[in-house]
């Protein structure tokens, strides 16, 4: 439909109120977009929404069935943590929110999208990315979001999102209208305090990373912080963090070669163990870093 209309990505994006980079990603065919966006484009071109909706559902079912190992990250420990909402808060959010499943590579919202909803992650793992070069659709990893975390705090004081969020696993999220979520915060002081604590915990985490001395300390501090939010705790007390060397390099703003050297040094000292897209912190390291 897009080719037949002779549209550019930017002209289409302007009419459906989405960033050009987001629409370009959707039309590239490299990942399955969200159904609501597909239908918005179909509607703009006067297409058959019911027919395209059925085609979308069929394709989504086929892709889901072909996935050999869905990564729901259900092994993430949901013990009390200042980074995430507790059981009571999640139940209250569930009352005002709808639930939506996602798959690896799905764009949840794009940088510059209008803010109409608040997203809280129920299950799974989300990447926060920042557009580095709009022309080449190049993104830089900013951070991760784990279960029961708010995906972004821009809804407090912005009209549009300052970053993009992309699914790093299969999962489920809550979508609450911004006005309903704000009203819930005003009526539920415990939930408001939990959200304030979540923001404070992230600020403390960022401060620890900034003041850490030396790359080794920065690396360990980063891993412990990620372990507290998106890691899975094993029976021996060690914590596994699903992350690649490239992702670590982006988060530390260093080269992958530097990360390789750091990991080699820390492995030789027994401070970490690693495998494909994962790093394991022994229980003793987790306890020592947490106490600092």
Image (cartoon, rainbow, N blue to C red):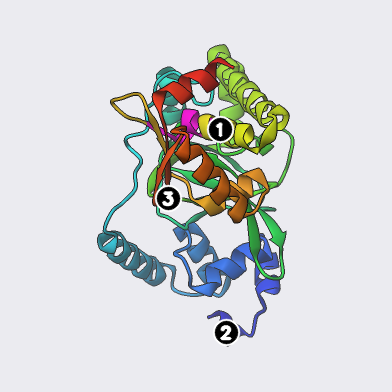
Q: Residue at x 28, y 66 (%)?
A: 62
Q: Earlier in the sequence, mark 1 or mark 2?
A: 2
Does dot 1 land on a helix, a strand or a loop? Answer: helix
Magenta range: 225-232
Q: Which residue is mark 1?
A: 220
| 246 vs 97: above or below | below
Q: Residue at x 55, y 54 (%)?
A: 246
Q: Which residue is mark 3?
A: 277
Based on the displayed image, in which of its 4 quarters is residue 197 positioned? top right
Task: Classify mark 2: residues with Cα within 10 Å, few (<14), some (14-19) or many (20+).
Answer: few
Please identify, in this view, whether the residue under mark 3 or under mark 2 is nearer the observer: 3
Please identify, in this view, whether the residue under mark 1 or under mark 3 is nearer the observer: 1
Please identify, in this view, whether the residue under mark 1 or under mark 2 is nearer the observer: 1
**Image position, residue 160 (x, y; %):** 70, 47
Is residue 241 toward the left or the right of residue 249 in the image?
A: left
Extreme residue toward the top, this view = 189
Q: Measure the alpha-carbon separation of dots 3 and 2.
A: 39 Å
Please check the rendered image and state whether residue 230 is part of the magenta-colored stretch, yes or no.
yes
Numbered mark located on residue 169 in the image? none
Task: From the image, give the main secondary structure of the stretch colored magenta.
Answer: helix
**Image position, residue 144 (x, y; %):** 54, 41
Based on the displayed image, in which of its 4 quarters is residue 51 positioned? bottom left
Q: Measure the alpha-carbon separation of dots 1 and 3.
A: 16 Å
Q: Residue at x 71, y 65 (%)?
A: 134
Does dot 2 land on a helix, a strand or a loop? Answer: helix
| 84 vs 173: above or below | above
**Image position, residue 110 (x, y; %):** 62, 54
Extreme residue toward the front, this view = 268
Q: Which residue is mark 2?
A: 3
Viewer can see residue 20: yes
């Amino acid at each position: 439909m897009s080719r037949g209309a002779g549209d550019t990505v930017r002209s289409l994006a302007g009419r459906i109120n989405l960033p050009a980079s987001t629409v370009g990603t959707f039309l590239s065919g490299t990942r399955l977009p969200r159904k609501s966006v597909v239908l918005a484009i179909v509607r703009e071109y006067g297409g058959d929404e019911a027919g395209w909706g059925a085609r979308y559902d069929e394709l989504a079912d086929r892709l889901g069935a072909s996935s050999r190992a869905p990564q729901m990250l259900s092994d993430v420990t949901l013990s009390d943590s200042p980074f995430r909402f507790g059981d009571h808060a999640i139940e209250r959010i569930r009352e005002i929110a709808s639930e939506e499943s996602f798959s690896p590579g799905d764009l949840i919202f794009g940088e510059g999208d209008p803010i109409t909803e608040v997203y809280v992650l129920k299950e799974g793992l989300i990447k926060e990315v920042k557009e580095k070069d709009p022309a080449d659709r190049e993104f830089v990893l900013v951070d991760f979001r784990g279960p029961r975390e708010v995906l972004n705090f821009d809804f407090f004081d912005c009209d549009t999102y300052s970053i993009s969020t992309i699914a790093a696993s299969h999962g489920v999220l809550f979508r609450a209208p911004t006005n309903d979520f704000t009203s819930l915060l005003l009526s539920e002081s415990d939930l408001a305090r939990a959200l304030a604590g979540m923001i404070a915990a992230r600020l403390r985490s960022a401060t620890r990373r900034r003041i850490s001395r030396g790359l080794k300390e920065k690396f360990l501090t980063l891993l412990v912080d990620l372990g507290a939010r998106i890691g899975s705790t094993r029976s021996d007390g060690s914590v596994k963090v699903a992350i690649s060397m490239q992702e670590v390099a982006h988060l530390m703003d260093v080269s992958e070669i530097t990360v390789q050297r750091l990991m080699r040094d820390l492995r030789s000292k027994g401070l970490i163990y690693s495998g494909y897209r994962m790093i394991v912190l022994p229980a003793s390291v987790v306890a020592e870093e947490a106490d600092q």
